[in-house]
Amino acid sequence: MLNLMKRSRFRRWIYPIISLWVALGLWVGTPQVSQGFSIWDILPDVIQYVQLASLGDRQEMALGKQINQQLISQEVQIYDEPELTDYIDRIGQRLAQESYRPPTSNYQYTFQVIDDDSVNAFATLGGFVYIHTGLIKEAENEAELASVVGHEIAHIAERHAINQMRRMALTNGLATAAGVDESQIVQIGVEIALRLPHSREAEYEADRVGLNMMTAAGYAQIGMIDFMKKLLRSRSVPTFLSTHPHTSDRIQALEQAIDPEFATIGDGLDPNTYERQIAALNGGSGDNSSSDETDEGFWPL
């Protein structure tokens, strides 16, 4: 884990340097059609590229909070049920502790339930993860649900949204002499969270990192594969699986990544415990009698 954290810190400062050299290299290596062209003409774009690539934890959280505020005020409806929200948060925090970017005094994770029957989940920078009620109902056990939560945490830990924002900001020319146009960057963040798919490479990486996170947190790995297979068999492919790469390819990659002999070893496979935890979604009251157990469900935090 220490080596992983060192690698994460190394990537944080080396990427901006590489980005600057790439941008300058492209400029130098491109034939210029105008004699009056100056390097100062591209500096705003270079500045913006570096700024987005080198966001610190506090800066990322501040930007994430603005994106979250716009999401919950204009785009989605929060499911206001404290017991269910606490349950999702416990799962999320348990997984986040095992991520490349664990919670710190400067960086926290926020897990929210969205009142929507579609089977979906998404995340944005700054540690914000959103799980639809439809997905919670679709999962058969906690390990299946945890597999999706872990996948979304992995997108955050690997800074996939920031990478997308950087590319889109450069493409759309949103730089100013002072740097990034913040309001437009927030809107890009909203679009990425809700409507723009991650790249093929990012999805595979989130699957792999999420699986490792599940394993380290003590969940049974089979939960991720079982849930994907179940959703693949459904009549309509859920939103969060409707993008490339194809779900069957992702399942095949996951099956190659785990040892079948140990795939069912771990927590979260008891459907009865899970049903009690999400009883509020079905009009019942949750049974928290298992909240102190560590063999099923969640670990107390």
Image (cartoon, rainbow, N blue to C red):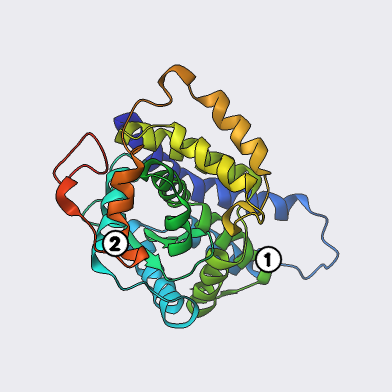
Which residue ends up furthest to the top in the rendered image? Answer: 261
Amino acid carrying mark 2 in the image = Leu
Report crowding for label 2: few under 14, some 14 to 19, many 20 or more residues within 10 A (C-alpha): many
Query: To which quarter of the image does residue 65 belong?
Result: bottom left
The residue that mark 1 highlights is: 171
185 lies left or right of 133:
right
Query: To which quarter of the image does residue 184 belong?
Result: bottom right
Image quadrant holding the N terminus, namely top left
Across and down, in percent, residue 290 comes to 18, 45
Q: Give the residue drawn at x 21%, y 42%.
A: 299
- Disc assigned to residue 4: none
Q: Does the CB distance between marks 1 and 2 fall below 8 Å?
A: no
Report crowding for label 1: few under 14, some 14 to 19, many 20 or more residues within 10 A (C-alpha): few
Amino acid carrying mark 1 in the image = Thr
Q: Which residue is nearer to you in this view: 177 or 12? A: 12
Q: Secondary structure at mark 1?
A: helix
Q: Secondary structure at mark 2?
A: helix
Q: Nearer the viewer, mark 1 or mark 2?
A: 2
Across and down, in percent, residue 27 comes to 71, 56
Cα separation, mark 1 vs mark 2, equals: 40 Å
Q: Is residue 107 visible?
A: no
- Disc assigned to residue 84: 2
Across and down, in percent, residue 205 comes to 54, 40
Q: Give the residue drawn at x 66%, y 63%.
A: 39
Which residue ends up furthest to the bottom in the rendered image? Answer: 74
